[in-house]
Image (spheres, helix red, strand yellow):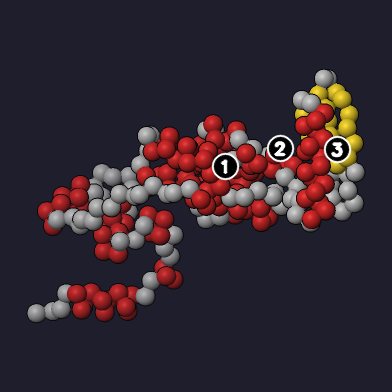
Amino acid sequence: MASFRQRNNKWQARVSREGYPDQVKTFETKADADRWARSVESLMDKGQFVDTQEAQRTTLRDIMLRYVREVSPTKKSGKEDTIRLTAIAKKPIGDWSLANLSSTRIAQYRDERLKEVKPATVIRELAYISAIVSHSRREWGINTPNPVQNVRKPTSSIGRSRTLLKEETARLLFALEPIGRRNVWTRPIVILALETAMRRSELLALRWENIDLRILCKSRMISHPQA
C-alpha cells in the first residue's frame, strides 16, 4: 500500500508491497505523488513492475569506474581499457544516471565526439559504453535498458593498405643498425614484424616454444628456392 509524508514543502510517496523492495520518490505536490504511487501499484498488480531505483541513483560514471576497478584488471587489455574508460567517465555523459541515459543522449554524445575525433574512435567508445551497461545488467543486477543498441554507429573511413617499397625497407633497416644503440633487438623485431605482420603485443609475448624452426625453414625454402 502507499503512504505519503510531507517534508520540506515536498511530498514523499512510499509504496510497500510484499515481494518487492519499498519504492520511494519525492514530488512537488501530493497529486503527483499519488499519481506515481497508483502507477507503481498498478504495474505490481500486473506483475510488470521493474525496480529502477538503483538505476536512478547510479550514474554511467559510477559503473565505468567500478568496471575499471573490478573487471579491467582481469582482462589482457586492462591497462589500455582503464585509460580509455577513465577518460570517457570524465566527460559530461558520465553525469547521467542509467535511468535517464537515453538513446537520444548517446546520439548527442556521438555527434559531439565526431567533431573531435575520428569515427573509428567514436565507434570504439560506443562499444565500451554498450558493453559496460550490459555488464551492469547481467552481473550487478541494475535494471536498465541499453541505450546504445538503438543508436546509429558512424561510418568508419576505409583504411589504407600499403606495404613498404624495397628502398623504404632498406632505409628503415639501415637506420636500425645496432651499432651505438642501447637496444640491439629493435632491428630483429622490426624484421620479424615485416615478415609476419604480427602486432607489437604479439611480438613481445613471443616465446621460443611458440616457434617451429622446421616450418620456418621450409617456408623460406618455398619463398626463396635455390637456383
Q: Residue at x 28, y 55 (%)?
A: 190
Mark 1: give few (<14), some (14-19) or many (20+) Cα within 10 Å.
some
Q: Quadrant of the N terminus?
A: top right
Nearer to us in this view, 16 or 217: 16
Of discs 3 and 2, which sits in the foreground?
A: 3
Residue 160, given in percent of the width and then of the height, sits at 24, 52
- Do labels 1 and 3 touch, CB within 8 Å? no
Residue 97, given in percent of the width and then of the height, sits at 64, 37
Determine which residue is flagged by label 2.
57
Work out how far the residue at label 2 is from the one at label 1, CA to CA, in angstroms: 15 Å
Determine which residue is flagged by label 1.
102
- Check disc 3 and give the amino acid type: Arg
Q: Residue at x 30, y 61 (%)?
A: 197
Q: Residue at x 65, y 41 (%)?
A: 99
Work out how far the residue at label 3 is from the one at label 2, CA to CA, in angstroms: 17 Å
SS of the residue under disc 1: loop
Residue 202, given in percent of the width and then of the height, sits at 40, 60
Q: Residue furthest top?
A: 9
Work out how far the residue at label 1 is from the one at label 3, CA to CA, in angstroms: 26 Å
Determine which residue is flagged by label 3.
14
